[in-house]
Image: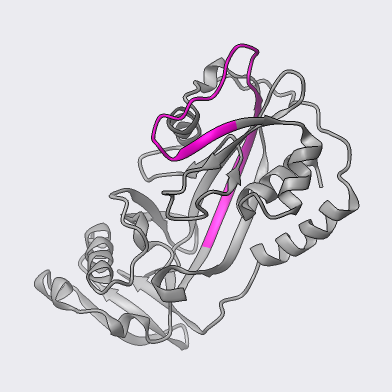
Amino acid sequence: MNTAVTPPARPAVPAPFFDGWLASARASAQQPPAQPRQALVVAGQVVGSVADGFLRKIGLQRLMDKRYKLLNQEHSGALAWHLDVPEGATTDALNTLAAALRDAGLCGPWRDEQLTVCNLQGEAVGTVERGAVRVLGIATRAVHLVGLAPDGRMWVQKRSMDKPNNPGLWDTLMGGMVSAADTLPQALARETWEEAGLQVDALHALHQGGHVDFSRQSREGGGAGYMLERIDWFSAQVPDGMEPCNQDGEVERFELLPIPVVREQVAQGRFTLEAGLVIAGFLGV
């Protein structure tokens, strides 16, 4: 991976109307749950949270078939949901719970993709289907790439209308989840190829710029989900003669826009909230 330490030059400070959007966006990215939540404890480890009463809506047969117990009982002085499983069965138990949520129509879009599940100390304890992470309040990681042309314009993508989240909105050159199979550099490389058809080693001045944290309500599970996510973002220059080309069908098109136009469209709400805050981070505001 090309890891030159000098980042691309940043544009001037954005206009005041962008600052107004930014304050509102940052507030939207950091919101407490809209309803009370109880900790989700699996094999004695807190790994997420669920809205009060949410898990009472699912059928338990899948869990019972594997002799997993789902109990609502005390943990650290408060009621919590306990998935009581044998040692080493955390991943299977979480995925069995995810399947029960899908059966009840209470899961997000099913992706057949596993994401890492961590305890409160940030230690990986298992994996779970991506479609279940929001309703189970499980923290996730994502990666974005801000891509610039040599003349300073920014490459952006228009999300496909078939995307389950934010269809048709604009996004950074690349944005995607870090799967359980990936390290952060591997996720950057894989998603950059899948979304933009670019090899990260062919980009210039690749630079890890920072991160954006989200904690906010999610519409998944009928509004019972909660999003906890860290987005690590990178910036790089796409050399002359090299253009992004989507490989996975999730991007409608790419455009090359001057930075002032990007700022204006972000402030107008034409970009996803995640992309807008990543771009704000790149701009240094």
Is residue 168 in view from this perspective?
yes
Q: Residue at the top extreme?
A: 241
> Is residue 74 positioned above or below 91 on the image?
below
Q: Residue at x 35, y 58 (%)?
A: 109
Q: Is residue 238 magenta?
A: yes
Q: Position of residue 234 (x, y in %)?
A: 63, 35
Q: Quadrant of residue 190?
A: top left
Q: Position of residue 255 (x, y in %)?
A: 62, 31
Q: Is residue 62 left or right of residue 157?
A: left
> Is residue 284 positioned above or below 23 on the image?
above
Q: Quadrant of residue 89?
A: bottom left
Display colour scheme = one colour
Is residue 224 in view from this perspective?
no
Q: Residue at x 38, y 86 (%)?
A: 53
Q: Position of residue 32 (x, y in %)?
A: 61, 75
Q: Is residue 251 magenta?
A: yes
Comparing 74 with 216, the one in front is: 216
Q: Quadrant of residue 278?
A: top right
Comparing 7 with 5, the one in front is: 7
Q: Is residue 261 left or right of residue 211?
A: right
Q: Is residue 48 left or right of residue 23?
A: left
Q: Residue at x 35, y 40 (%)?
A: 181
Q: Position of residue 150 (x, y in %)?
A: 73, 18
Q: Residue at x 32, y 78 (%)?
A: 82
Comparing 42 with 234, the one in front is: 234
* Region of the chain picked out in magenta, as a range: 228-254
Number of on-image labels: 0
